[in-house]
Image (cartoon, rainbow, N blue to C red):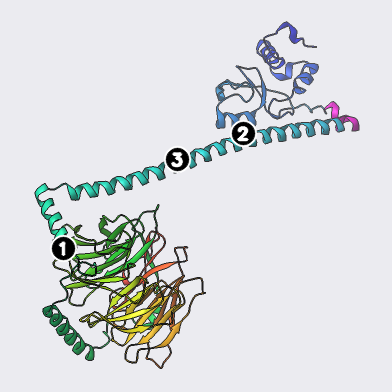
């Protein structure tokens, strides 16, 4: 019997190892009882009698060689004491080929039941330890998620502050140059926004005195009308126009985040056909000029204090006109570096400006407002030549568009009425009833005969030759208004925007207008605000109630599909 009490600092395994070292004999020289004692020693890791026993020099613990070597390779330390352990610290024990004695517990059924009970207890304890570790891990994960959420909130706040700082910087950059030139600009703006000394005088009816549309301007408008009418008679469908089968295969090409996330929504889109530039007006009070070819923002037009409800290009794209819910109209001048600077601020309306439309001469434009009036402006001076109010109705104007020939102006009202005006005399020459809800959009076909109007109840097509409605589209339910309607430049296709985008093939009065393509609302907002055809209908630009401008077309046209 070996007594380990004489060596309190050593374990039974260390003591056995020392006996081996002192004997300097092989295992076959040892007495048989001692060998039995040695083989009855159980390995620390496996809990079984080791086949290849080794002893640690540092801790004196007995291990199965294959198990301890694998543990050292993985962790480099003792599995029991946690001390550093290497292969050199292991001393192999040579043993004879002696039959291993059967464990006492396995010699009887009660002993085996006791072994099973011990195994079960060990399993329950292990399961409990695993549950404790899982609980700790869940707490750590919850803490990490909380930190991530806090970090996201901080990042969102910093982004918002960055956007506000950039906006303030843009304002400061416009106001910084030379006080003298600034004073001249402000003076010119004051002279051109309906606040001249002469215009400050009120007429007998209490309204501002306007210069009116002169005879020379009427002559210019008439000559333009005659020239365009002659060209229209010879008009042919361009061979470069996108064919019907191409329209049917259109899909989303790109999605560009042009506006802010905290005030998402694109309310108006306009395309400069020759330069392939796209202008958007947003809920975030900004307008953006975007180059589709390069995929870059050319300029962000900041200055309005409320949402930009309408935006239009003028002439060669060097001028942009915007109307806003802040009751103002701004004219922006492009520069060589691509930026657009505000040159005039027009304050002739007393309510939200809902629409801007540019005359075919590119010398004049009209604005329509909820104050129940529309204004005719000279573009060079930005002087309001006349302001027309309809005393017969109290509804405000929600949309407006020039006829392609330029002598007719169409307006839509919040009272579901479409009115046609003679620009020369500013007289209301026709009136179309039948819509339900505000007339949100209006578009003349390039053929000069068709007028499309959109409202709560869908889209109505009007024959201007007979002044009657010849077709009605009701693509959505009564709770989904149609926000946009647009003929392409050739007059071959008609696009409708509501809860989705639908493209129709234009036909005659008597023939059916077929829907050739329907695009889903990929913004997820269920509200398409503006739809415009690109040059030759090669793509379609869509603005909805998120911050992204989306383009639909054929992928082989050189644009790869991306989603921001």
For disc 3, the marked residue is: 151
Measured in 3D between alpha carbons, the distance from the residue under mark 1 to the one under mark 2, in whole angstroms, is 72 Å
Q: What stretch is highlighted in magenta?
A: 103-112
For mark 1, give the secondary structure.
Answer: helix
In this image, 223 relative to 291: left or right?
A: left
Task: Categorize mark 1 by other alpha carbons within 10 Å: few (<14), some (14-19), many (20+).
Answer: many
Which-is-in-front pick, marks 3 and 2?
3
In the image, farthest residue toward the front: 204
Could you tell me which residue is drawn at 15 percent across and 71 percent down?
211
For disc 2, the marked residue is: 136
Measured in 3D between alpha carbons, the distance from the residue under mark 1 to the one under mark 3, in whole angstroms, is 49 Å
Which-is-in-front pick, marks 1 and 3?
1
Give above or below for 15 relative to 409. above
Residue 492: % across, % down: 33, 84
Measured in 3D between alpha carbons, the distance from the residue under mark 3 to the one under mark 2, in whole angstroms, is 23 Å
Which quadrant does the C terminus fall into?
Answer: bottom left
Residue 282 image-quadrant placement? bottom left
Residue 219: % across, % down: 13, 82
Magenta span dominant secondary structure: helix
Residue 162: % across, % down: 32, 45
For mark 2, give the secondary structure.
Answer: helix
Could you tell me which residue is drawn at 41 percent across and 93 percent down?
510
For disc 1, the marked residue is: 192
Which-is-in-front pick, marks 1 and 2?
1
């Amino acid at each position: 019997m070996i007594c380990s009490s004489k060596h309190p600092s050593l374990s039974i395994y260390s003591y056995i190892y020392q006996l081996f070292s002192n004997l300097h004999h092989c295992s076959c020289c040892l007495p048989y009882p001692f060998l039995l004692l040695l083989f009855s020693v159980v390995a620390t890791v496996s809990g079984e009698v080791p086949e290849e026993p080794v002893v640690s020099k540092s801790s004196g613990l007995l291990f199965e060689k294959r198990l301890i070597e694998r543990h050292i390779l993985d962790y480099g330390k003792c599995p029991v004491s946690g001390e550093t352990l290497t292969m050199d610290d292991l001393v192999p024990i040579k043993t004879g080929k002696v039959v291993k004695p059967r464990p006492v517990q396995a010699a009887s059924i009660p002993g085996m039941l006791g072994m099973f009970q011990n195994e079960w207890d060990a399993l329950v304890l292990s399961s409990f330890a695993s549950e404790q570790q899982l609980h700790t891990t869940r707490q750590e994960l919850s803490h990490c998620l909380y930190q991530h959420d806090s970090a996201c909130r901080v990042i969102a706040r910093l982004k918002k502050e960055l956007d506000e700082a950039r906006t303030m910087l843009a304002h400061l950059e416009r106001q910084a140059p030379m006080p003298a030139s600034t004073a001249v600009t402000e003076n010119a703006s004051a002279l051109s926004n309906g606040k001249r000394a002469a215009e400050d005088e009120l007429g007998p009816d209490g309204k501002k005195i306007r210069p009116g549309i002169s005879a020379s301007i009427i002559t210019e408008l008439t000559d333009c009308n005659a020239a365009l009418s002659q060209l229209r008679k010879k008009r042919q469908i361009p061979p470069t126009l996108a064919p019907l089968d191409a329209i049917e295969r259109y899909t989303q090409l790109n999605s560009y985040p042009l506006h802010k996330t905290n005030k998402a929504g694109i309310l108006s889109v306009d395309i400069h056909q020759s330069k392939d530039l796209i202008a958007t007006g947003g809920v975030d009070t900004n307008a953006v000029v975007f180059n589709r070819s390069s995929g870059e923002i050319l300029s962000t037009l900041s200055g309005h204090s409320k949402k930009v409800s309408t935006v239009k290009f003028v002439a060669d794209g060097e001028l942009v006109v915007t109307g806003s819910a802040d009751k103002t109209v701004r004219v922006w001048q492009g520069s060589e570096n691509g930026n657009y600077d505000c040159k005039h601020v027009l304050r002739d309306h007393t309510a939200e400006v809902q629409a801007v439309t540019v005359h075919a001469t590119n010398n004049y434009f009209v604005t329509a407002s909820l104050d129940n009036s529309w204004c005719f402006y000279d573009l060079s001076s930005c002087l309001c030549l006349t302001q027309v109010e309809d005393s017969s109705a109290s509804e405000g104007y929600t949309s407006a568009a020039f006829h392609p020939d330029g002598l007719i102006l169409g307006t839509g009202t919040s009272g579901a009425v479409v009115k046609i005006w003679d620009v020369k005399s500013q007289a209301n020459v026709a009136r179309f009833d039948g819509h339900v809800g505000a007339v949100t959009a209006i578009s003349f076909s390039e053929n000069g005969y068709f007028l499309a109007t959109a409202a709560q109840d869908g889209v109505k097509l009007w024959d201007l030759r007979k002044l009657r409605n010849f077709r009605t589209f009701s693509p959505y339910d009564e709770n989904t208004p149609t926000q946009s309607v647009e003929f392409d430049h050739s007059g071959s296709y008609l696009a409708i925007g509501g809860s989705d985008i639908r493209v129709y093939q234009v036909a005659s009065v008597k023939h059916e207008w077929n829907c050739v393509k329907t695009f889903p609302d990929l913004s997820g907002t269920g509200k398409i605000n503006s739809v415009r055809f690109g040059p030759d209908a090669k793509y379609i630009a869509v603005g909805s109630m998120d911050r992204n401008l989306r383009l639909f077309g054929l992928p082989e046209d050189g644009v790869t599909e991306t989603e921001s």
